[in-house]
Amino acid sequence: MNDIETPSKTTAKNAQPTKRRPSSSLRKWGPAMLAVIGVLALNAYLLGPTGHKIPPPSDRAQRRMQLSRERTTQIEEMEWDDVKVHRNFNQFRNLSEEEGGVMEYTRRRHRALGEYVHVDVSDQFSIFGKVSVSLIYFAFWVFLMFPNWFLPIGRPGIALGGGLTMVVYRYILTLSGDGPTFYAEKVIIMEPLFLLFGLMLTTIYLEKMERGGLFDKLRESLDDPINWKRSAKIMAMSTIGSAAVMNDSVVLIFSGVVVDLCVRHKVANSLPYLLSLATTANIGSALTMTGNPQNILIVSLAYDDISWMEFASNMVLPVFAATAINTIMMFAYYGSELFPGSSGFAENVGILFGGNRTPEMLAQEHAYYARAAAKKEASGDVSAEVDVVDPGDSDGSWSLWSRLQVIVVTLFLICFAAGFDVCVVSIAAGCILMTINAYKHQHYDPKPDTTQYDAEGNPLPPKKTYDMDGNEIEPEEEELITESETTLTEVDYGLLMLFIGQFMLIGSFDDTGVPQAFFFATMQGCADQMTSVPCVYWFVAVITILSNIASNVPVVQMLAATFPYATPYDWMQVSFSATIAGNLTMLGSAANMIVAFQAAKVGDRTFTSERHAPFGVPSTILALYGGTFLLTLVHFSPECSEKLGDCE
């Protein structure tokens, strides 16, 4: 009898994860190495190993360069008067001839965006200053990439320490005459910090306000007993959400949700699911001008107007192609985790399109529905005893507080889409939810039970206190615990410190002119025709490298200062390449850092630089070049600047 396997034992045996042999270094890094070699081979074929195949600038390119020089000279010769500078630069885009037209627009543009446009001070550094600042930057870059290799400080502490190190060292360079003054307050861009704070505030109250509320319903919508379906749902939600709202907000909200789903299903490796969230958040954000910070900055810095529809229409095909490539790579690279029990790629295709199931997948489904049935039965028993049904948890209905959450979130999305300031909208949404939660806590939540009991469980009468004269002291009414003591303490201020430190590190590094020198040294003759074929394929490779070394937002600032009259089509290529490049390494995108940080907060530290790169490198390169190819074939933005006058 002991040798006979019962059905329950068979199911349990099938449910156990299969042991996998550790993959070799070649299998782990082979796709990444092939992708890098492919990029180098393609560009060597198109441009020549030494760049001898780079075509000379076309007549249009030469005319644009001449007009750019003339426009810059005219602006520099204009006398400056006291022009009232507004932070909302969009007010200056359409000036009448009486107001100065395009010339006055250009002058005000440089003054209004002075805090965002990179100012070249590289000529004020000595060679020693440039080299030493660059070494400090790359040292902290390595520390941030691999924080576990050194002291257990954590990324926020490393970044803030690096930023303060730059401030002190730049002051020493100023005293020694090896560098200019470092204005740290000017390189810290406040808008992303305001936005992150508002999003964290909103996220916390969506999650903590009510059990079974909107946040839990979103979590349930992503749940599925089948691993690959759960990953596909995460990718679909992340792509659409990032395009509609912003990639940072999506990963901030759903990083904890994804980790919770992995814990619920006891998955051995949560990395595929966290990568599903992070990579598609970056790809989806490329679709709209409000999808990520660099797109918002591009629309502000672009010389010509770029509308929301124009931006989205250009990006539809590239984003769709990048999403498809990333999804295929995800299912292929992590096939053993997402398709347990499958024999290989061919069977995975049959599972995807034929509805097939492996014994391990059937066991997962049975266990999932068994847990759901047990939970429902237990919930029904509790309801029968107390004769109360929790509207937010038991029967899936929507309570008053859930409806209020939906209203606030809907208004939040409408204001985002309408073009209102994203920082103000996110902070306002968080404050509204905080007020609602405080009102709910004061008037509707049950008061804490302070009754004391004896050893037999009988309630004890409240203790009485007396003063020195023997008079009974009336007990004071207990004060309610405030939001400042509870929910507000859960705002991740360490994440804000991480970005402040990175801004100071990157700002000081950009001052040296090393990123700009790298750009021109690598682009060579393609610098003045960077988005024309075949130069565009080398251009996106250079932007990818710079975005992962100096971050995508500073790269956009640098390009805006270097090429102030870039065409709308140029900016489309910059936006797509700088955004997709964020998936290459951990430090390539703020969304990656947020996912790693939020997952680590709840105890999941699988999302690291070493584990991200083997998938990120090949997936990013294929998605980047596939989307760039489509964008060169189909785009609706002009390849000329109307305000510069080279469209005639």
Image: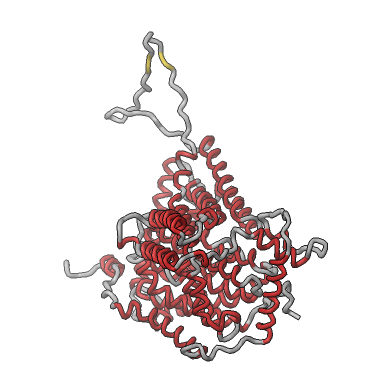
The spot of residue 384 in percent (x, y) is 43, 44
Give the position of the C terminus as an image quadrant.
bottom right
| Name of the residue lying farthest toward the right | 98
The spot of residue 315 in percent (x, y) is 60, 74
Q: Nearer the viewer, residue 7 or 188?
A: 188
- Considering only vertical position in the picture, is 527 above or below 220? below
Q: Nearer the viewer, residue 113 or 346?
A: 113
| Name of the residue lying farthest toward the top | 469
Residue at position x 52%, y 88% in the image: 47
Residue at position x 44%, y 68% in the image: 127
Q: How is the image coloured?
A: secondary structure
Q: Is residue 225 visible?
A: no
| Name of the residue lying farthest toward the left | 2
The spot of residue 71 in percent (x, y) is 71, 72
Residue at position x 33%, y 77% in the image: 28
Q: What is the total number of numbered labels drawn onto the structure image?
A: 0
Residue at position x 38%, y 56% in the image: 158
Query: In the drawing, does residue 592 fall left or right of residue 291?
Result: left
Query: In the drawing, does residue 180 fall left or right of residue 417?
Result: left
Q: Nearer the viewer, residue 366 or 439?
A: 439
The spot of residue 164 in percent (x, y) is 42, 53
Give the position of the N terminus as an image quadrant.
bottom left
Q: Nearer the viewer, residue 173 or 403?
A: 173
Q: Is residue 543 visible?
A: yes
- Considering only vertical position in the picture, is 431 above or below 570? above
